[in-house]
Image (cartoon, grey):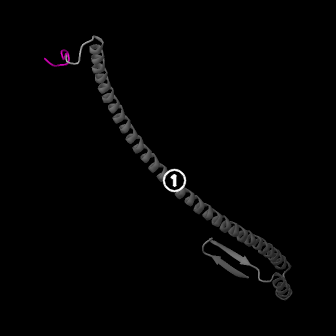
């Protein structure tokens, strides 16, 4: 029998090296050593329990190995998923930064366009006022022409 100590998992594993050989050796030594039938029965029961525990221990070792392999596989899978998600997060962060920049650029363009619109409206108002003055002057000239006044008559045009 050998004992395996696994410090990471905190358990001791007992493995039967060759159960048939041990049983054969035990049977030979039984016939030689024990002459008391009560001790012989007790020894046989202990041996049976020992063999059962060895088999159970083997099953448990296999289960531990299987679970360890599954855990390692899931750990690798989870690590890969985390890496993929971190890359997606980084990509999304970059997209957010670009979209925020686009929003800021669009806001600046809107401000610029609104300023240009205000200036255009102001120019329109000034042009409208000039046109109104020009129109009033034209109407005054039209009235004068319609009255039959001659071009030498300068009264009403600001001359004295």
- Residue 139's place in the image compared with 79, above or below, is above
- Residue nearer the viewer, 153 or 105: 153
Residue 153: horizontal and vertical position, in percent?
19, 16
| SS state under label 1 | helix
Residue 67 figure quarter: bottom right
Report the residue marked by disc 1.
95
In which quarter of the view is residue 140 placed?
top left
**Who is closer to the viewer here, 32 or 97?**
97
Between 93 and 159, the one nearer to me in the picture: 159
Q: Is residue 102 above or below residue 26?
A: above
| 11 sits left or right of 98 in the view | right
Q: How many marks?
A: 1
Q: Which residues are magenta?
A: 153-160
Quadrant for the C terminus, please.
Answer: top left
Q: Which residue is located at x 68 percent, y 67 percent?
A: 73
Decide whether the magenta segment is chiefly helix, strand or loop: loop
92, above or below 33, in the image:
above
Q: Which x, y percent locates residue 75?
A: 63, 65
Please report the residue visible at 27 percent of the width from the left and 11 percent of the height from the top.
148
Asked whether 121 falls inside the magenta stretch, the response is no
Quadrant hosting residue 74: bottom right
Q: Check disc 1: other Cα within 10 Å, few if <14, some if 14-19, many if 20+.
A: few
Q: Position of residue 33 (x, y in %)?
A: 82, 87
Q: Residue at x 71, y 71 (%)?
A: 65
- Asked whether, in this view, residue 156 is left or right of residue 31, the answer is left
**Which residue occupies the foreground of this view, 99 or 127?**
127
């Amino acid at each position: 029998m050998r004992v395996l100590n696994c410090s990471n998992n905190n358990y001791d594993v007992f493995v039967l090296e060759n159960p048939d050989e041990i049983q054969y050796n035990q049977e030979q030594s039984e016939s030689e050593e024990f002459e008391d039938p009560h001790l012989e029965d007790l020894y046989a029961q202990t041996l049976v329990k020992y063999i059962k525990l060895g088999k159970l221990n083997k099953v448990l070792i296999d289960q531990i190995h299987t679970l360890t392999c599954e855990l390692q596989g899931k750990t690798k899978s989870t690590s890969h998923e985390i890496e993929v998600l971190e890359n997606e997060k980084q990509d999304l962060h970059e997209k957010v930064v670009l979209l925020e920049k686009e929003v800021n650029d669009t806001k600046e363009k809107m401000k610029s366009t609104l300023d240009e619109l205000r200036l255009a409206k102001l120019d329109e108002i000034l042009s409208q006022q000039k046109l109104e003055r020009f129109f009033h002057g034209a109407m005054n000239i039209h009235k004068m022409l319609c009255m039959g006044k001659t071009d030498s008559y300068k009264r009403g045009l600001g001359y004295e």
